[in-house]
Amino acid sequence: MEQCKKNTLIVIGLAIFLMIAIVISFRLGRYPISTKEVLGILLSKIYPIEPFWTDRMEIVMLNIRLPRIILACLVGCCLSAAGAAYQGIFQNPMAAPDILGASAGAAFGAALAILYYGSPFMITVSAFFFSLLTVSLVYLVSKKVKGKSVLGLILAGIIVSSLFSAGTSFIKLVADPTDQLPAITYWLMGSLSGARVSDVKFAIIPMVIGLIPLLLLRWRMNVLTMGDDEAMTMGVDANKVRFIVIVCATLTTASSVSVSGMIGWVGLVIPHLTRKLVGNNYSYLMPATMLFGAIFLLMVDNVSRTLLATEIPLGILTAFIGAPFFIYLITRERETY
Amino acid sequence: MSIEVSNLSFSYGGQPVLEDVSFTAERNELLSIIGPNGVGKTTLFRCILGLLSGYKGEILLDGINIKKLRIEEMAKLIAYIPQIHYPSFNYSVFDMVLMGTSVQVSAISAPGRKERKLVETALKRLGIYHLKDRGYTRISGGERQLVLLARALVQQAKILILDEPTSNLDFGNQVRVLTEIKSLAREGYTVIQATHNPDQTFLFSDTVMAMKDGRVLAWGTPNEIYTADLICNLYGVEVTMESLHHDKARVCIPKSIVEENHARKVCS
């Protein structure tokens, strides 16, 4: 009971922290807006307030900073949730959102769209659909693998991912090196710099559709970490739950990657950090990791857009922060409860 | 609950693993299945638990064919206690046991107050309540086995299937775990365990089934079937059988050892 209370407080604490981080993020940037003005503009949307800010402030905040902040939170939340979910259903602490090829497929889709001079919106849509296509292909291949279903899925993920990575490499080879190739390379590094309201509108529906079942099924994921046989004898249909979780985690990953490009590490590191914080029970782990992921990516994105005059791609920053952290994680003592 | 297995055969890739296995186990009965490694005990358990389906023959729980039961219905009738394992993620003992209540709550909700109460009762009954906040991977093997047993109890199924519950335990923990299992059988559970230790099997079981090469070699009360010949036949080791405490216990001793000692005595 003590542990439960502590974990509930941690989840509430993370939610409050996220609110504060969002308000601070609105302030950051080249055009100065004070906290009072941020709160005023936000409140004016639900409650009529006499504007004490300039129109320009409102435009910067709502059209430029707002979509970016929402996307950073959503992408961080989705990638962390997908990572935690995959770790559970594959009984594999090293599982990440791209374990079933969602990222490799998205990269191929985006590169293909850039090759055919697609609009930014077309790039997002193409990335999303190729991501879903890749994971479906992985699932179909794994069904043909004899024996253990978990191993079959992971192997099929590796195989199909490498196939699509090769496809991406080929597109880079034939792409126009003056404009297409840099565009592809930049997309692959992952960034939210082009975040527009249309991106938010496109991604938010599949994201929410994916996130809700992941939250609802979180107790079942605990049981799945015991392995299929034990889960089945405890009355949990392992294959059914795994299928639903894969569909949902794929939706969240595909929609994230399609708007943000490749952002590594978040889906692997954040769930592990959260495990240290609240333990492995998904009842607390899932909501906590969602909030933590949102906070993390929001803060990293803030660094990415304010540290230097030019944008630093998010994928680079998350790896710079993620790798040393992971070294710390694997070298420190094991948890002792 | 009674369990009735009739003419069960299973083959894996054309290789027969179980052949014509038949037995029954009733309420209040502790049935031990003995036999060398790889004899098909695990396959038998997987069939009984509904994890394998391509078998011939019938498995009936209180007269109902298990092929007609859904996974959730099965879990309410029959619980499985696996060998001690190391899960990928560490859970507190309490959470570990709480997982056993999953079948009693809907797929999208977590166990609540009622289920937590069940867990507390089960932990207290097995004398491991003080471990409830410890990590499952941080406690001893014997304690871990009791945790898995508690998890099966909160599942509230009346048939318990145990896969070598005393392997990897020290002597004290073996006796403790077997005593608990035996008293559960006395409280109305139907208990089936796979085991390796013939002497303990004799001490604790109500019935014993000996398996060799996927077939039932002998099935009956320990007194009837537990002989030097059976052990020799099962494990390929010549033994002599000693009866102790008015046949309350029997001990089998490898002949090679006894006869060597005997010879040495004669020499000196």
Image (cartoon, rainbow, N blue to C red):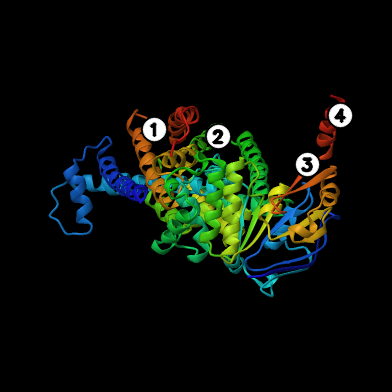
Q: Amino acid at mark 3?
A: Ile
Residue A216 visible in rendering: yes
Q: Nearer the viewer, residue B235 or A39?
A: B235
Q: Give residue A335's quadrant in the image.
A: top left
Reading the image, the residue beneath label 2 is A181
The answer to whether tags 4 and 2 share a subunit is no
Q: Nearer the viewer, residue A129 or A116?
A: A129
Residue B6 is situated, as x and y percent measured from the top left of the image, at: 78, 68
**What kind of element bears circle 1?**
loop
Reading the image, the residue beneath label 1 is A311
Q: Chain of mark 3?
A: B
Q: Quadrant of the N terminus of chain B?
A: bottom right
Q: Chain of mark 1?
A: A
Reading the image, the residue beneath label 3 is B253
**What kind of element bears circle 3?**
strand
Say whether residue A123 is left or right of residue A302.
Answer: right
Residue A59 is situated, as x and y percent measured from the top left of the image, at: 26, 47
**What kind of element bears circle 2?**
helix
Q: Chain of mark 4?
A: B
Q: Amino acid at mark 2?
A: Leu
Q: Amino acid at mark 4?
A: Val
Q: Amino acid at mark 1?
A: Glu
